[in-house]
Structures are given as C-alpha cells and as structure tokens.
Image (cartoon, rainbow, N blue to C red):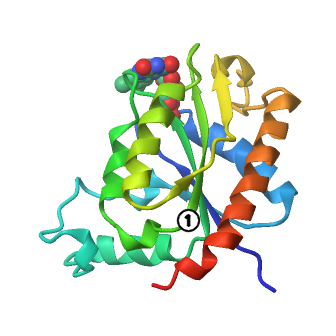
Amino acid sequence: MSKPILQIFTVTTREGRKGPAVAAWFEQVAREYGKFEVEPIDLKMVNLPLMDEPEHPRLRRYKHEHTKAWSVSVQRADAFVFVTPEYNFSMPPSLVNAVDYLVHEWAYKPVGFVSYGGVSGGLRAVQMTKQLVTALKMMPVPEAVTLPLFTTAIDAETGRFAPPDLQARSGIAMLDELLRWAEVLKPLRTV
Ligand SMILES: Cc1cc2nc3c(=O)[nH]c(=O)nc-3n(C[C@H](O)[C@H](O)[C@H](O)COP(=O)(O)O)c2cc1C
C-alpha cells in the first residue's frame, strides 16, 4: 500500500528568509518518521500572484494556469504541515494568499504547524491560521512544533537549523496525529 502524502510548506517568500532552514530540518524529521511520502513545497517557488481568479474557487472554474497547477499540487496531498513564522502577531500574507486560491483541494485533510519566532515561537500566527483552515474543512491537530528564539539554533556559518531533540519529539507526536487523521478522513475525500 502506498504511503499517504504529506506536503510540508515553506510559507515565507522574502529575500533572506529563514523559513527554508526550519523546513529542511522538519522535512528530515518527517522522512525519518517514515510513514508518509514527504513532499516539500516552497511558496516562493510556487510564486502565486495575489489572488487573481475571477470566480469563487469553490466553483473550480479556474482561469489561470498558475491556479490549475496549484490545484493539482494540493489535491495530491493527504496531510499538510505549514512551516510558518508570525509577521506582526499574525500569519504571513503569502500563506493566506496560497490558501485562498482553493477550496475543495484542502478539505478533509489534517494540518499541523511548525512555527518559529521570538519569544512567541510564532504561536499567534498558528492560532490565527487555525481559524482560516477550518473554514476550508481542514482539520488542525493540536500537537505542534513551537520554536521560540529559533535563531539561536541556526549555525552562523552553514545556516543549518538544529534545535534540541525535544523539538523532533514534538514533531513525531504531531506526525502521529496527522497520520491518524489522514487515514480516518480518507472516506470523506471524494473529490
Ligand atoms: C514583517 C515581519 C514581521 C515580524 N513580526 C514578528 C512578530 O510579530 N513576532 C515574532 O516573533 N517575530 C516577528 N518577526 C521576526 C521573525 O520571526 C523572523 O524575522 C523570522 O525569520 C521570519 O521568518 P522568515 O525569515 O522565514 O521570513 C517579524 C519579521 C518580519 C519580516
């Protein structure tokens, strides 16, 4: 039997962003976990413009090629992880924009969060994003990876992010839940 597909999103897009270092670390945790087929997705590479579809995405009458490609990509997934910081106590606009493009492709799939930041560890962005994802019938799991003062775990020379082991254990607890929900929600994913 094929493994469920876990898409891990790097959501930030700015020049000099740290998101890819955090996402690379979590991708490794997920690959070692071994029960998902892991697909890293970088929103900077996806490069969606600000939402420009003329019709509501629930109708699935996409006009633009970038939306059609994004739809095919998200549709493939069984579960998601958003690797996100907080910008001004909320989620980065690139995350909201990417989510807003689609409706059905997100539905009945569990979502987990790896968040990073200063003392807050990005938690305020996570709480806000939970409200957004539930509007699209995603199932946010409470288990999470929260990375306060995350830059202290970035190697100054290599840029590699290597947090304490505790964080990988939090990641595994989250992956366990994502797997459970991905399996039980499968019958609802008929589209
Ligand atoms: C526009 C902007 C707003 C920010 N606001 C917050 C914030 O509210 N809380 C926080 O902990 N860090 C904040 N930061 C610092 C980020 O945690 C830090 O820059 C992080 O590296 C951002 O992720 P990125 O590098 O992937 O863009 C902010 C950074 C930027 C660029």
In the rendered image, is residue 15 in sight? no
For the residue labelled by badge 1, is the local secondary structure a helix, a strand or a loop? loop
Instruction: Judge whether 68 appears above or below 13 on screen.
Output: below
Location of residue 139 (image quadrant): bottom right
Q: Is residue 4 left or right of residue 10?
A: right
Could you tell me the amino acid type at mark 1?
Lys
The image position of residue 102, as x and y in percent, is 34, 66
User: Which residue, given by chain and number where applicable, does mark 1 sit on?
Assistant: 109
Q: Is residue 101 left or right of residue 158?
A: left
The image position of residue 56, as x and y in percent, is 19, 69
- Where's the N terminus, which quadrant? bottom right
| Residue nearest the observer in this picture, 149 or 126 | 126
**Which residue is pictured at 54% across the width and 27% down the height?**
123
| Residue nearest the observer in this picture, 34 or 181 | 181
**Which residue is pictured at 56% across the width and 38% down the height?**
19
In the rendered image, is residue 87 in sight? yes
Q: Is residue 49 left or right of residue 120?
A: left
**Which residue is pictured at 38% across the width and 37% down the height?**
92
Instruction: Judge whether 147 appears above or below 118 on screen.
Output: below
- Where's the C terminus, which quadrant? bottom left
**Which residue is pictured at 59% across the width and 59% down the height?**
110
Instruction: Judge whether 88 appears above or below 184 on screen.
Output: above
